[in-house]
Structures are given as C-alpha cells and as structure tokens.
Image (cartoon, rainbow, N blue to C red):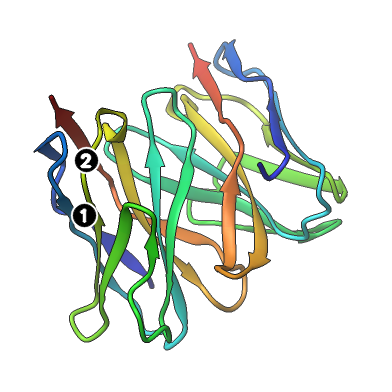
Amino acid sequence: AQKITQTQPGMFVQEKEAVTLDCTYDTSDPSYGLFWYKQPSSGEMIFLIYQGSYDQQNATEGRYSLNFQKARKSANLVISASQLGDSAMYFCAMREDTGRRALTFGSGTRLQVQP
Amino acid sequence: DAGITQSPRHKVTETGTPVTLRCHQTENHRYMYWYRQDPGHGLRLIHYSYGVKDTDKGEVSDGYSVSRSKTEDFLLTLESATSSQTSVYFCAISESGSYGDTQYFGPGTRLTVL
C-alpha cells in the first residue's frame, strides 16, 4: 500500500524568503508519480508540480521546485521568494502508475506567509 | 481549466435521506474519481471510474455508490446519509500529458448531514 507523510502541520515564512515543505512516501511500485497541490482558503485544489519516479532531474515550475531524493523516498516542495498569496494548505500526493491511477494524499501542511 | 463542474456546490440534508452529487466534465476524459476531504486528512478515494459503466471502489467506499452512464457524468450517491458523511466532496479527472496522468479537480461540494 502507498503512504504519504507530511510531518509539518503548519509553517510560517517571511515574505520574499524561500520555504521547504516536507513530504516522504512509501511504495513498493517501481513506477509512480509525485504531485503537489495547493488549496487556498477558497477551497479549490490547484495542481502545482509533478515528478515522475524515473525523471532524472528535479521538476521546476516557476517559483516551485520539487526536491526529489528517490533513495530517501522524499519529495519536498520548495517555494522561492514567497508571496502573501502563497498562504494556503499544501498537499503532497502519489499516483499509482498502474490500475486505477488514483492519488494517495498526505495530511497537508498549512503555510502562512508573513509580511 | 479541465472543464469540471460539480453540483450542487453546497447541500444540507438530514440523516437517512438519499443524496446524489453530480460531476460533469466536458473534455471526454476516461478516468473520473470521487474523493472526500475531512479535517486532518488529505483527500481520500471513495470510488473511481475507468469508463462508461466501469466503476470500482476506493478506500472509503462504505455507504456510497456511483454510476456512470455517460462519459461526461459521474454520479455519487449516498443511499442513506449519516452524520459521518459530512464532508467536502471533490470530483477529479485524469488527463494524460507531459505530467503523465495528472488529476485535475472540480470545485468541490460541501455536504452537511444533520
């Protein structure tokens, strides 16, 4: 069974600074995908970034990067130059690459960006 | 925008009544999913569909049923709602692309069972 662990229930960061949100995962599948989603207070789930298990390079999308350490089974999200609008819940998720292709989610980290 | 809508967006109902939530997509995606979100948890899979009339259970399927008679619509039914089913329900589609199979979510339905 797949499992995602996010150990930081809440984080604070100063505006314009970088922040790292931790995510570790457990799976016996050799092929999988790792995702980060943002959920602002309005409630929608917004896709941020994706890393495939066979990707050699860390994924980047604008100010978001995913620090993928396969041997350690970690997939941390790095947000550079934090903005007030980054305040939200952030969820790490893993997708099975076979069968139902469903996502398994962590419990989330609430990020608050302070001016 | 993956073209996903959910209806209703908010619903209050009483214990023991049947409730049906609708997910509608406009882009002919094969895979569709229903998740629920509760405080302290991420989203958890209720049911999913891999085609018209093809559905299967997720981790928290007890008390829920689904139907998919058309590609664009995926219905979630609570046969007899209970207070433990008070939650936010998200529908998702799986879209193949440069990110593998990425899931995109509808806006959610907030359901309260009194």
**Residue B64, percent from left and from top:** 62, 40
Going by the numbered disc 1, the residue's amino acid type is Gln
Tell which of B42 and A22 is nearer to you: A22
**Residue B38, percent from left and from top:** 37, 34
Please say if A105 is above or below B96: above
* Residues at marks 2 and 1 touching, judged by CB atoms closer than 8 Å: no
Please say if B15 is above or below A1: above
Q: Earlier in the sequence, mark 2 or mark 1?
A: 1
Give the residue at x 27% y 38%: B40
Secondary structure at badge 1 equals: loop
Give the residue at x 58% y 24%: B81
Displayed quadrant of residue B65: top right
Give the residue at x 52% y 22%: B110
> In this image, A74 relative to A33: left or right?
left
Chain identity of mark 1 = A
Secondary structure at badge 2 equals: loop
Please state which of the two labelled residues, at mark 2 or mark 1, is closer to the viewer.
2
Tell which of B64 and A14 is nearer to you: A14
Q: Which residue is mark 1?
A: A6
Q: Which mark is residue B40?
A: none
Q: Which residue is mark 2?
A: A82
Give the residue at x 46% y 24%: B86
Displayed quadrant of residue B8: top right
**Residue A24, percent from left and from top:** 22, 67
**Residue B92, percent from left and from top:** 62, 47
Q: Quadrant of the N terminus of chain A?
A: bottom left
